[in-house]
Amino acid sequence: MFKKIIIVGGGIAGLTLANFLKKNNFNNFRIYESFEKKLTRPTGIQLTPNAVRILDFLDSRFFLNNNFHKINYLSINSLNSRYFNSKSEVRINLQNIVSDKMPYLTCDRNILIKFLEKNLSSKEIFYSKQVVQTIKDHNIIRVKFNDGSEDYCDLLVSADGMFSRSRLDNNIISKTNFYAYRGVLKNFYSKYSLENDVIRLWLNDNKHLVSYFINNQNDLSFTGISKSSEKTILASGETNYSIPFPVDQFRTLFSSENKILREMLDTLHEVYRWPIFSLKKRVFYRDNQIFIGDSSHGTVPFQAQGAALAIEDSYVLYEQINKNITSNLGVFYFNKRNNRVRRIILRSHLNVFLFHLKNPFFVFLRGIIFKLIEKSFLAKKLMFGWIFNYNPRSSSYFF
Ligand SMILES: Cc1cc2nc3c(=O)[nH]c(=O)nc-3n(C[C@H](O)[C@H](O)[C@H](O)COP(=O)(O)OP(=O)(O)OC[C@H]3O[C@@H](n4cnc5c(N)ncnc54)[C@H](O)[C@@H]3O)c2cc1C
């Protein structure tokens, strides 16, 4: 049994792990988070059924008591399509893919963080404590902070995101050509009827836009991703998603003939932009240090699975700790996670290609594939079943 666990980073991965440890009476853990505790600007997040299932292990039917929003359909359209419910729209019913009926949710990221923070005490989670160095000393790891203080543990969990300092080798961070643009339209009422259980995906060459409601107050989140001619660079502060972007430039970038999209973009007052990075290789463990979430396998956000993978990682790691696996923990964890993470990353990269196609012939072919997925239950299962039905408590997850 580990005597003490330190978790670096209080994002979705670190908080989920802490919750499972606490729920199952492992009380000797601490989370250190570099930022002070405060709610950030609203940002939408999609929680696919594989993530919801694990959060449900933590708190059964949590989504009934909190401000989570249920999604039933994925609508795919072209950014250039003039009409909203045009023939070119593909509408995939997501409800009948999931065998145990776990819902597909969207929410404001703050709601998820609040849900994960609520059971942790000030003796368990420490804010404004940035880890600046970790030193291995036999079986003990010494952890140093920016205020000069130190702590120690016999298991270090790095949940400190894409730019993880505790990973030590940051030359595995790869620049991409993509920038993400995000915003939330508060209380959005459309003069066109807009169903609120639909995620809308608009595609165009070298860019796409995703929008969905994040609560029952009609707050509408949108995320645009566009390819730039230059590789991404990181200006200071951008890891905190806080660089405002001129709204008129954003409107020009995602200009559309579609009346609903135009209505949305005209209503906008704030857009934030930040660069997308990914990791060149996956890192799961090093001696008695384990990596979870983006610090382990951060990738491009083209399949809405980053947070979901972080939640899966946390549960699987907790399970191994709970089984009292100490000597080869990293190996067991790697064996459980590597294949799944690799496949999700591959899918995300396939979507980079699929979403941003330019060539009209390939765009036509893509339309046929999407129509097939819309109409054929088997094609839909093949596309989404293995992602959504993942259950770490069961060996079969395809159906
Ligand atoms: C545009 C975009 C849209 C996305 N949409 C979705 C979506 O819809 N669904 C989905 O599942 N995923 C989505 N993702 C991915 C998802 O946001 C990430 O994969 C997820 O947040 C990773 O969680 P994490 O806890 O591993 O890392 P993070 O959320 O990055 O958390 C890391 C934490 O560690 C802290 N930290 C860092 N360094 C230190 C240090 N030295 N000391 C102490 N603390 C430290 C940070 O402050 C932070 O709080 C999206 C990503 C992007 C870019």
Image: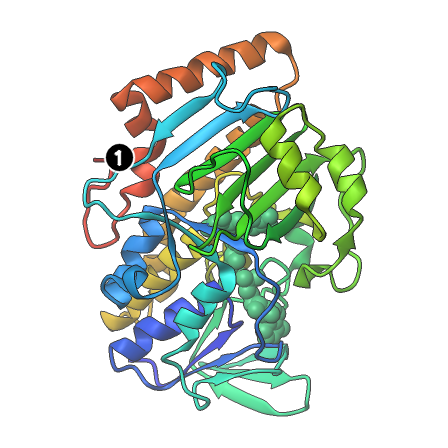
The image position of residue 210, as x and y in percent, is 55, 38
Give SS at disc 1: loop
Q: Which residue is mark 1?
A: 97
The answer to whether one can see residue 290 in this image is no
Q: Residues within 10 Å of mark 1 (few under 14, many from 20)?
A: many
Q: Is residue 298 left or right of residue 57?
A: right
Outermost residue, top side: 361
x 62%, y 28%: residue:
259
Q: Is residue 351 left or right of residue 330?
A: right
Height in image: 38 above or below 365?
A: below
x 57%, y 61%: residue:
42
Height in image: 197 above or below 366?
A: below
Task: Please identify the quarter of the rendering in which residue 384 is found.
Answer: top left
Outermost residue, front side: 191
Out of 9 and 185, give the one closest to the viewer.
185
- Quick one: quadrant of the N terminus? bottom left
Out of 94 and 80, give the one closest to the viewer.
80
The image position of residue 135, as x and y in percent, is 58, 79
The image position of residue 395, as x and y in percent, is 19, 46
Height in image: 127 above or below 208?
A: below
Task: Please identify the quarter of the rendering in which residue 295 is found.
Answer: bottom right
